[in-house]
Image: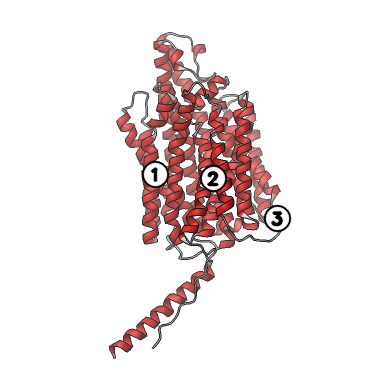
Amino acid sequence: MTQATAPPRPTGVDMTHRQIMEALSGLLLGLFVAILSSTVISNALPRIITELHGGQSAYTWVVTSALLATTATTPIWGKLADLTSKKTLVQIALGIYVLGSVLAGAAQGTGELIACRVLQGIGAGGLTALAQVIMATMIAPRERGRYSGYLGAVMAVGTIGGPLIGGVIVDTSWLGWRWCFYVGVPFAIAALVVLQKTLHLPVVKRKAQIDWWGATLITAAVSVLLIWVSLAGDQFAWLSWQTVVMVLGALVLGALAIRVETRAAEPMIPPRLFRNRTITLAVVASIAVGVGMFGASIFLGQYFQISRGQSPTMSGLMTLPMILGLLVASTVGGRIITKTGRWKGFLVSGSVLLTVGFALMGTLRADTSFTLLSVYMALVGVGLGLTMQNLVLAVQNTVGPHELGAASSVVAFFRSLGGAIGVAALGAVLAHKVKAYTADGLAQLGVPTASSSGGGTLPDVHTLPGPLRAVVEGAYGHGAGDIFLAATPFALIALIAVTFIKEVPLRQHNGSAVADEVERESTVAAGAGAAVIRTGEQR
């Protein structure tokens, strides 16, 4: 009696582990560049904005502009990845990033810097989206957890190294903050060379139909919303005619975008994807995680430098507990997921830790014990490490190979959207709170409120007299605690969303639902053959 032979499993790309690692090396270099573009300026921003004579609004928009560009272009990159050469696309993204970086380094004012950051964001959006898509093309879902650990490690190294590199550059007199933008260029060029030699994927030859109207309307709706959030309460009152015009405008543009997307032949964000419960819940969780990840953590550098009087380099070192938590959680979690094929428990536990971490960070003040603060940051880091990549993994496990780009970019899009909204909204909250706390502190000193620095340029606490410095440090410390507290409900929303996601064991291949059925039939056939053999042996 011969054993039944299972038919071959369908896969997207047949590559050995060595070939995957070679191709992944260039891809990870590109991802490192994308992460570096945002993290390298985190501790340098207070110095950059001070030297360019910008205020809290400029501080927020230097970050938000890049996130907005990343958000708006992620679906475009994802859709193009389903229609044309992924290798060419990732090389174009690297080229755009290099151009934006060089121009940003030469900026002479905050307005010019913000415009150059948009260009950087477009390139970073391509690198972020395409890294997920290309990895999904090369590696089956069951094995992807192992390689996602490498992605998580690179993200952690970029997040660790970025602030430290930026801090050292700013603190080095013969370099200066402009090198924060130039430093990523060599890595981008190296990534181009490595990808050219190692990345070999089949090219899908069909005409690309890009939904430019949908992309434009989505970008416009998000932009109007972010402009309103960042200006309301400062340039005009929350309840004013400007608010009515901007909110209604954003709603109208959003409604038009939905209408266009439902009618487009190749929509940027395919509405049919949201019929899938896993994708819908993952999107909700991604928005919430994005708000917390970008919106709250981006202001840590400002807290350490203004509230605690630390140098940019020390500010980077003091965030290590959060980054190490992210590194360990993403690497170890990815390996366990690959071994077991189970991922929901990691999403739930990560969301719990994120919620608890943000709530504890809400107690932040200028004189908070650094030991306690380290524990709080570690909880946030572990929470992020267990949620970010696994949300993408859960979505990729539910779609066929022809929709990997669109599905992956949808999650990345909404995570970046949440981040952009979080930075703008929490930045506005921080500016308002700092202004109020500074005014209260000055009133207690008997100093006129007009002397407050809350509404002008960012203060250099080292140049302030003792009593005034204490007021400003206390105001920024209390304000930082308030924005983490404001981010806590979003982490709770993420927890609720992932709780309702149905866990589906990770597939052993890159196929679709049809391939799943083939694999199930193969397993049944193999099991039946084994049963017949055992019966024959017993006889």
Look at label 3 and name its amino acid: Gln
- Estimate the spatial distance between the alpha carbons at disc 2 and disc 1, rounded to whole Å: 18 Å
Name the mark nearer the viewer: 2 or 1: 2
- Cβ atoms under marks 3 and 2 closer than 8 Å: no
**First-in-chain label (3 vs 2):** 2
Residue located 55% across and 59% down the image: 275
Q: Position of residue 446 (x, y in %)?
A: 43, 8
The residue furthest bottom is: 539
Which structural element holds mark 1? helix
Which image quadrant: the N terminus? bottom left
Q: Quadrant of the C terminus?
A: bottom left
Along the polypeptide, which appears first: circle 2 or circle 1?
2
Disc ID at residue 209:
3
Q: Name the residue nearer the viewer: 390 or 241.
A: 390
Q: Give me the residue at 47% from left, 52% from top.
A: 391
**What's the mark number on residue 30?**
2
Provide the secondary structure element on which disc 3 rests: loop
| Mark toward the start of the polypeptide (3 vs 1) | 3
112 or 164: which is nearer to us?
Answer: 164
Residue 5 badge: none
Rounded to the nearest whole Å, what is the CA distance between mark 3 and mark 1?
A: 39 Å
In this picture, is 4 found above or below 443?
Answer: below
Q: CA distance from mark 3 to mark 2?
A: 26 Å
**x, y percent for residue 128:** 54, 46
**What residue is shown with label 1?**
327
Question: In terms of depth relative to the viewer, which is nearer, 286 or 250?
Answer: 286
Q: Is residue 349 above or below residue 419?
A: below
Label 1 near label 2: C-beta < 8 Å? no
